[in-house]
């Protein structure tokens, strides 16, 4: 990596003798301001300053990208040379020669902070900018929190810094973040501007010397903004500390604000949350590199192109899946069982697409969905003859799914892939009725399917590597996070959720109220607690599944104990609520009460409180006070315990997979890095000890019995999470 004092490729040096073009060969892949680049920037600036023949400076990136920001791996190891980006940004700003930033491609994080030191900024029309540090638990620590509000005002700076969102060049121009947007060669435009600026005063362009633009009601604005930031953050520290840094800019001189920024940055760096968020960032990339126990892998499998897809069933899930496919520009056929269902489904899909189109328009994009070549509705399976891939999203019923797959196998072209959106059913059984089990795969979307990022991809015994690769490619095209997992009841996500929800219900039997349990888990950082979630999803969904499994309903053997199934503890509470028609939000009553059927505001329900107390009396359960620690530990540690079993069974190839599933599909707080990462921070010996304790108290709950793999890892000395899988087949003397 070198750093030259040369004119950009394609520039004619001789025509512009007075301009020094500084080319920054930034990070090899991301153009990040790594140490070598910082050093080179400093050297280049000093040389340009000292050279009287240089009259102005332009800073640009190589290969059409300004800079993707600091390499986040670098944050964990402080820079020994003591070379920081902040002082270099100041050095740029102090230059007596005009410095112009030529922003092409992306200018993110440290990259954008470099441009804030420049006296002028020119962006290409397709450039995108942002300060995404908050998303990895940090703040823009190169004086960005002090310069940006001075440039674009506090409201816009707060929005950009506390959300980390990227903005387009046109928005940047509107906000005053850039001075000019060009459609042609940005570097040439920057050189032209730099030429015009030679000899002109620069004082008013040095952001550190400017005051933060005043608001008539700054104090009230900040108070209100803090409430909003905290609400959105749900326990994540970085947005609030970003806010504090910007607030400092409104109250203190630049140098003091910079000191405050550094102080807050260091708090975040050592908070543990930044580590968790960075882990989550890399975990998401790690799961792209999928492997299976039989040796299939992303390295050798190639995806097949999907030129046309179909979705069967336009209920809750199918509607969102169709919307996602249209947004991904994949032509789609949407199929229902009859015209009545089709019309309802079509209206719902069109409404979703109209809303999506409106959102996209605000970002300057268009969505074409009124074209029959892009979206077609049908009731006849014959229209599926030419599709490359089908996603089935009919009711969760094995017999129905088998009937559909058998039909698909006969109608679709031989090379077409057949996917099922089942939540828990056996992929092998579904595949068994087709003549192409190697092309059958589970694609488990999450509700609402056009919003939720997770796509659990479940391979069966016969699923080919090509099919897995194709499903993963589909996830990517749909801008989702695909996670490849093995076939078992509930796969990864729902299987781990089951003991969590089960504990939550047991806690009600023993003395808690739904709102107590939800509050503890929401304080932990979950978007919604288990009871609010159950009301939202509908209690009838689980009821139907328990009836199918013979756990409740008419098939239950007479004389079965109310609170036991197969010798283990069982709580009939959710069944009893369903028998009373309390299905959750849809009926206006569930674990909570709502203003009306379909209402969304959950209010604690005195009826539930007296129902629970009668239930405890009937079953002679002594009500006890359950503290927050027990609620948290019993719910989370059983979920984590199941995770260890999943790893031991080879259902997922590493703990990151489980964490990515939970963060993207189940509202697990990202700043806690996912359940398995969280387990590693709590310490496996602590988790084991607590599970042993609760298991002794509740010997009839197998989910509380510590997983053999967890025990093994503890016996092996509590190795770091990255090493867990290497211990799976190792012998332990202590077991
Ligand atoms: P739903 O009841 O809302 O919709 C199912 C749709 O399938 C209905 O519109 C129905 O008319 C249609 N259908 C039934 N038989 C059909 C046939 N023979 N041909 C064509 N269409 C037919 O169900 P849903 O909630 O969308 O669930 C669909 C699948 O997705 C289930 O397997 C479910 O377990 C799974 N799932 C649901 C959720 C969720 O939160 N709802 C989440 C993940 C996965």
Image (tube, rainbow, N blue to C red):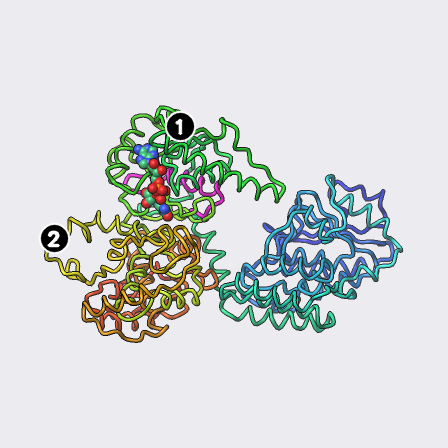
For the residues bearing labels 1 and 2, Cβ distance under 8 angstroms: no
| The label number, if any, that marks residue 415 in the structure image | none
On the image, the x and y values in percent for residue 711 come to 28, 67
Direction from residue 521 to residue 240 in the image, left or right = right
Q: Which residues are magenta?
A: 458-482
Number of marks present in the image shown: 2
Write down which quadrant ligand 1 falls in: top left
Describe the element under mark 2 as helix, strand or loop. loop
| Residue 722 shows in the view | no
Q: Is mark 1 within 8 Å of ligand 1?
A: no
Q: Residue furthest right?
A: 199
Direction from residue 528 to residue 109 in the image, left or right = right
User: Which image quadrant is residue 243 in?
Assistant: bottom right
Q: Is mark 2 within 8 Å of ligand 1?
A: no
| Residue at image mark 2 | 557
On the image, the x and y values in percent for residue 565 come to 17, 58
Point out the tag, 1 or 2, that comes first from the N-terminus: 1
| Residue at image mark 1 | 378
């Amino acid at each position: 990596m070198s750093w030259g004092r040369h004119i950009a490729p394609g520039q004619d040096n001789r025509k512009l003798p007075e301009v020094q073009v500084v080319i920054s060969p930034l990070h090899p892949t991301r153009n990040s301001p790594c140490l070598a680049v910082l050093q080179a920037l400093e050297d280049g600036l000093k040389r340009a300053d000292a050279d009287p023949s240089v009259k102005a400076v332009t800073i640009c990136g190589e290969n059409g990208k300004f800079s993707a920001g600091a390499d986040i791996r670098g944050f964990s190891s402080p820079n020994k040379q003591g070379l920081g980006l902040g002082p270099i940004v100041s050095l740029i700003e102090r230059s007596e020669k005009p410095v112009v930033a030529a922003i092409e491609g992306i200018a993110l994080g440290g990259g954008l902070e470099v441009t804030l030191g420049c006296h002028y900024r020119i962006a290409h029309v397709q450039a995108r900018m942002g300060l995404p540090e908050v998303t990895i638990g940090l703040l823009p620590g190169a004086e960005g929190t002090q310069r940006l509000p001075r440039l674009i005002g506090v409201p816009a700076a707060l929005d950009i810094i506390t959300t980390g969102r990227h903005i387009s060049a046109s928005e940047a121009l509107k906000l005053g973040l850039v001075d000019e947007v060009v459609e042609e060669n940005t570097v040439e435009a920057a050189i032209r501007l730099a030429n015009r600026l030679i000899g002109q005063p620069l004082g008013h362009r040095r952001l550190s010397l400017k005051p933060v633009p005043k608001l008539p009601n700054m104090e009230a604005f900040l108070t209100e903004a803090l409430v909003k930031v905290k609400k959105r953050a749900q326990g994540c520290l970085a947005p609030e500390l970003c806010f504090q840094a910007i607030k400092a800019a409104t109250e203190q001189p630049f140098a003091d604000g910079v000191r405050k920024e550094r102080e807050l940055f260091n708090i975040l760096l050592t908070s543990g949350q930044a580590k968790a968020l960075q882990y989550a960032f890399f975990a998401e990339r790690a799961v792209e590199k999928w492997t299976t126990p039989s040796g299939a892998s992303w390295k050798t499998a190639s995806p097949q192109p999907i030129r046309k897809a179909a979705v069967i069933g336009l209920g809750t899930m199918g509607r969102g899946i169709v919307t996602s496919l249209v947004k991904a520009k994949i032509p789609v056929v949407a199929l229902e069982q009859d015209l009545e269902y089709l019309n309802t489904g079509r209206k719902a899909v069109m409404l979703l697409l109209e809303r999506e189109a409106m959102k996209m328009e605000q970002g300057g994009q268009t969505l074409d969905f009124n074209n029959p070549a892009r979206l077609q509705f049908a009731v006849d399976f014959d229209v599926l003859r030419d599709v490359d891939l089908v996603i089935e999203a009919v009711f969760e019923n094995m017999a129905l799914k088998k009937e559909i797959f058998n039909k698909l196998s006969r109608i679709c072209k031989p090379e077409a892939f057949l996917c099922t959106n089942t939540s828990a059913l056996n992929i092998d059984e579904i595949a068994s009725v087709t003549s192409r089990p190697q092309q059958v795969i589970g694609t488990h979307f999450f509700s609402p399917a056009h919003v939720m990022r997770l796509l659990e991809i479940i391979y069966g015994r016969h699923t080919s590597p090509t099919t897995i690769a194709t499903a993963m490619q589909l996830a990517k095209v749909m801008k989702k996070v695909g996670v490849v997992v093995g076939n078992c009841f509930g796969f990864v996500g729902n299987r781990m959720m089951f003991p969590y929800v089960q504990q939550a219900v047991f806690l009600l039997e023993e003395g808690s109220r739904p709102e107590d349990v939800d509050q503890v888990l929401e304080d932990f950082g979950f978007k919604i607690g288990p009871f609010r979630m159950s009301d939202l999803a509908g209690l009838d969904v689980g009821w139907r599944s328990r009836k199918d499994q013979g756990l409740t309903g008419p098939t239950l053997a007479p004389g079965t104990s109310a609170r036991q199934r197969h010798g283990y503890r069982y709580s009939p509470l959710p069944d009893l609520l369903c028998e009373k028609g309390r299905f959750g939000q849809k009926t206006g009553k569930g674990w909570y009460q709502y203003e009306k059927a379909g209402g969304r505001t959950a209010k604690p329900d005195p009826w539930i409180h007296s129902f629970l107390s009668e239930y405890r009396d009937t079953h002679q359960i002594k009500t006890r006070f359950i503290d927050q620690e027990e609620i948290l530990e019993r719910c989370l540690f059983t979920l984590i315990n199941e995770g260890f079993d999943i790893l031991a069974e080879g259902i997922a190839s590493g703990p990151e997979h489980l964490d990515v599933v939970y963060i993207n599909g189940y509202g697990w707080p990202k700043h806690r890095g996912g359940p398995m990462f969280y387990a590693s921070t709590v310490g496996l010996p602590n988790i084991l000890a607590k599970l042993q304790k609760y298991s002794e108290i509740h010997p009839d709950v197998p989910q509380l019995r510590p997983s053999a793999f967890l025990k093994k890892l503890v016996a092996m000395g509590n190795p770091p999470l990255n090493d867990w899988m290497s211990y799976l087949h190792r012998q332990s003397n202590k077991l």
